[in-house]
Image (cartoon, grey):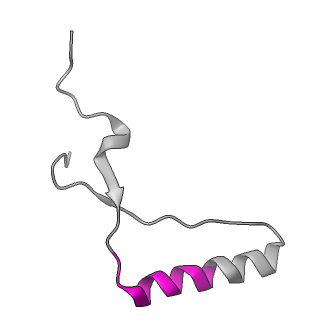
Amino acid sequence: MESNKPVEFDRYTAAHLSPDMLQRIVSLEDEIRSTTDKDVVLIAYEESQHNAT
């Protein structure tokens, strides 16, 4: 039986960001990497409009 309840991972989608905002995220990744000596990836999500709960 199929449920109509939204699946948790379906509530969010990749955020649509301006090139300036993307560059700021990359710069922050670089800053964290240089401070911690660990590879990090920051991911920007926004709540999906089709499945907002």
| Rendered location of residue 46, percent (x, y) | 32, 62
| Rendered location of residue 50, percent (x, y) | 15, 49
The magenta region covers: 17-28
Residue beneath the point at 51% across and 86% down: 23
In the displayed structure, 3 sits above or below 42; it is above
Residue 20 lies in the magenta-colored region: yes
| Rendered location of residue 49, percent (x, y) | 17, 55
Q: Quadrant of residue 34?
A: bottom right
Quadrant housing the C terminus: top left
In the displayed structure, 18 sits above or below 13; it is below
Q: Quadrant of residue 15?
A: bottom left
In the displayed structure, 35 sits above or below 11; it is below
**Which residue, as the protein is rendered here, is positioned at the far bottom?**
20
**Which residue, as the protein is rendered here, is positioned at the far right?**
37
**Which residue, as the protein is rendered here, is positioned at the far top?**
1
Q: Quadrant of residue 41?
A: bottom right
Residue beneath the point at 21% across and 28% down: 5
User: In the displayed structure, does residue 7 sit left or right of residue 30?
Assistant: left
